[in-house]
Image (tube, rainbow, N blue to C red):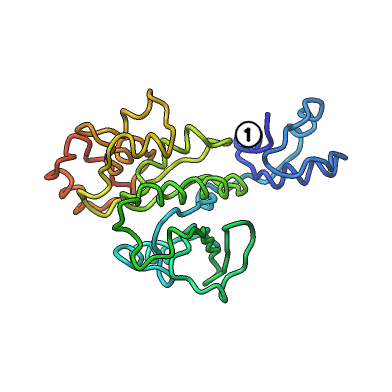
Amino acid sequence: MKIYEYARKRNIKSKDVVKRLHELGFNHLKNHLSLVPGKVIDKLDKTPFPVRDKALQSIVYLTLECQPFINDKIGDKVSAKLTKSKRVKNTIILPKFNITDTILEKVAEDIYKTTYKLNDYYFLASPDFERPKLLGYADDHKRIAFYMKKALKLIEQLEVDIINIHDWPLGLFPLFYRQYSKLNNAKIEFSIYGPTYSGIYALNDYTDVFKLDNSTIDLATYAKSINLLKAGLVTADTFDISKTVIAELKQSYLKAFIYDNMRKS
């Protein structure tokens, strides 16, 4: 059993378990991905760890936009959601799109970071994002794939309870996360801003870049194409969606995948 698995079972923090294991002499155990030695389970079970407050669960926001850094269509909406957050600190992962290096700290290969209004912002760098537009190119699917793959590696270094994905470009993330994540224990919330005919690709485009299992690719398929919005609608755990958008989706081509109790907030 890994440390994060033990911590989740008891609704406690992984870092508290790591600290206790160090106190017990297991200093070689570095983080939540380390294995809990079987011989110490009894001592851990008797340790009165502080219980996690579910209202303060760790959440990571995956989005291509967020003010004040990137604002094409939904950046203001993502920023507004962060403003309403009750958490002291949030983690946001963005592509490095038109961001000046002077305000960023390089923390790993292709990964930069800054703190703004107490929140941590990570920026994933790729030459493919050094273009005039955020989206609107023939290779958008490859650019989105790079972002999602790099974001997954970063998420695995964090302690995460909820992953909040924003808008149709990231609709395939729940399937990708469940197939490739080493942890695969976070709930995925999908923030949806309306129906769209964007995010529709030939099957080979996404099967080639994501290597999804044949058993799961059907969940992302609509009308013999990969449809990112449909994929998110049928695979996310919870939704952040307004009643107005639900009404719009019920009138769209994806109406078969919409239900009244989708609205989470």
SS type, badge 1: helix
229 to the left or right of 155 = left
The part of the image, by quadrant, that contains residue 136 is bottom left
Q: Quick one: 22 or 234, which is closer to the camera? A: 234
At x 54%, y 61%, the residue is 122
Name the residue at the top extreme: 215
Q: Quick one: 142 or 67, which is closer to the camera? A: 142
Residue 104 placement (x, y as % from top left): 57, 70
At x 35%, y 52%, the residue is 140
Residue 256 placement (x, y as % from top left): 18, 34
Q: Quick one: 23 or 134, which is closer to the camera? A: 134
Residue 250 placement (x, y as % from top left): 15, 43
Name the residue at the right extreme: 25
27 to the left or right of 96 = right
Q: Amino acid at mark 1?
A: Glu
Please tell me how crowded label 1 is: few (under 14), some (14-19), or many (20+) other residues with Cα within 10 Å: some
The relative height of residue 88 versus residue 188 in the rendered view (above or below) is: below
Q: Quadrant of the N terminus?
A: top right
The part of the image, by quadrant, that contains residue 20 is top right
- Residue corresponding to mark 1: 5
244 to the left or right of 140 = left
The relative height of residue 71 versus residue 161 in the rendered view (above or below) is: below
